[in-house]
Image (cartoon, rainbow, N blue to C red):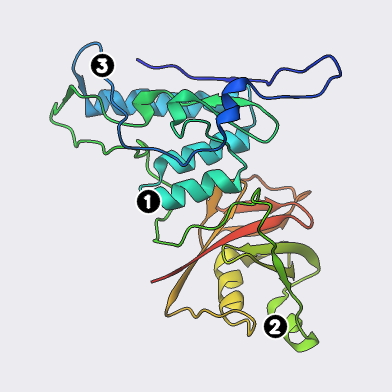
Amino acid sequence: MGCCSSAEANSDNDGQTFRPSNLRGGNKPLKRKGIRWTADSPITAAELQRQRDTFWDTAPSYEGRPEVWQAIHAAVSESDLALAQSILDAAGVTLPTGNLADGCYDELGNRYVVPVYCLVDPTNLSSGGADPVTDMASTSTSLYTHIPYSPPQTNDDKSVVHSVVSSTTEEKSNIDSGSYPITIRLSTSLDINIKIATDGSETIGKLRLRLMAHPSLAFARDSHYLKFIYLGRILDDQVKLYDEDANVQNDRNNAKIAKEGVLQALVARK
């Protein structure tokens, strides 16, 4: 029906890590068109959904990094191609062919392969009385909220220089909520160094409101969207932010941020 795998990159005699030769083609944009497959026998939407759920439930147990698998899952689940691409970029995922079924790589050289049945419906999908699933859609209830946005420039683009906001004391007092330092990296190539509270009182929703009110930013709440991503995970408004040593689980309601870590913020006009 499909294949899935993850493998470590090879090492040379000096112990230096290198990626397989198929990476020499560079990093191609995520591709969705032109991917086709046919099941061995007609399959219903419900059966296809079970297969996809099984893969995503077990993918983190394969070799590779769980947070990268999470980012890949988020990208596959996202219907907006540009947003899906930005999720992969934020996680440092490289696509040699643009097709996730051909494999992709993280920054450490680990290889990840998503089976084609997770990407598109088969040509012989049977109605079977179930609701049809759409191409590149997650089969489980998505934890991610879709909004349109403008794609950011990738972090590995050496021509991009991120400017850093230098706030006055008054501005800092308005945007900071605590003493834990992190960086907000906007898709407009602007970095904002702030300090947040990590006692559970800081949420993505509150952080968004403070950023929207920041005088150095040229966008407003009524005209722009602002979407946050950390390690490939899209963070909804109710998510509470904690420091990396907090005794909480990373789940749909909580996110542990590394000290001086970078929180991606995608900006787009409504």
Q: Amino acid at mark 1?
A: Asp
Assess whether mark 3 and mark 2 are in contact (beta carbons under 8 angstroms). Answer: no
Assess whether mark 1 and mark 2 are in contact (beta carbons under 8 angstroms). Answer: no
- Graded by Cα atoms within 10 Å as few (under 14), some (14 to 19) or many (20 or more), the crowding at tag 3 reads some
Horizontal and vertical percent position of residue 37: 28, 21
Q: Quadrant of the N terminus?
A: top left
Q: Earlier in the sequence, mark 2 or mark 3?
A: 3
Q: Residue at x 46, y 30 (%)?
A: 100
In the depicted view, which residue is nearer to us: 43 or 262? 262
Mark 3, residue position: 39
Q: Quadrant of residue 261?
A: bottom right
Q: Quadrant of the C terminus?
A: bottom left
Q: Is residue 250 above or below residue 3?
A: below
Mark 1, residue position: 80
**Separation (CA) of disc 2 from disc 3:** 57 Å
Residue at the top extreme of this rendering: 40
- Graded by Cα atoms within 10 Å as few (under 14), some (14 to 19) or many (20 or more), the crowding at tag 2 reads some
Q: Going by the image, does 181 lie left or right of 175?
A: right
Q: Quadrant of residue 145?
A: bottom left
Tag 2, which secondary structure? helix
Residue 62 visible within the image = no
Q: Residue at x 39, y 56 (%)?
A: 146
Of circles 2 and 1, the one toward us is 1
Tag 3, which secondary structure? loop
- Graded by Cα atoms within 10 Å as few (under 14), some (14 to 19) or many (20 or more), the crowding at tag 1 reads some
Q: Amino acid at mark 3?
A: Ala
Horizontal and vertical percent position of residue 31: 40, 38
In the depicted view, which residue is nearer to us: 62 or 96? 96
Mark 2, residue position: 174
Q: Going by the image, does 258 lie left or right of 142?
A: right
**Separation (CA) of disc 1 from disc 3:** 26 Å
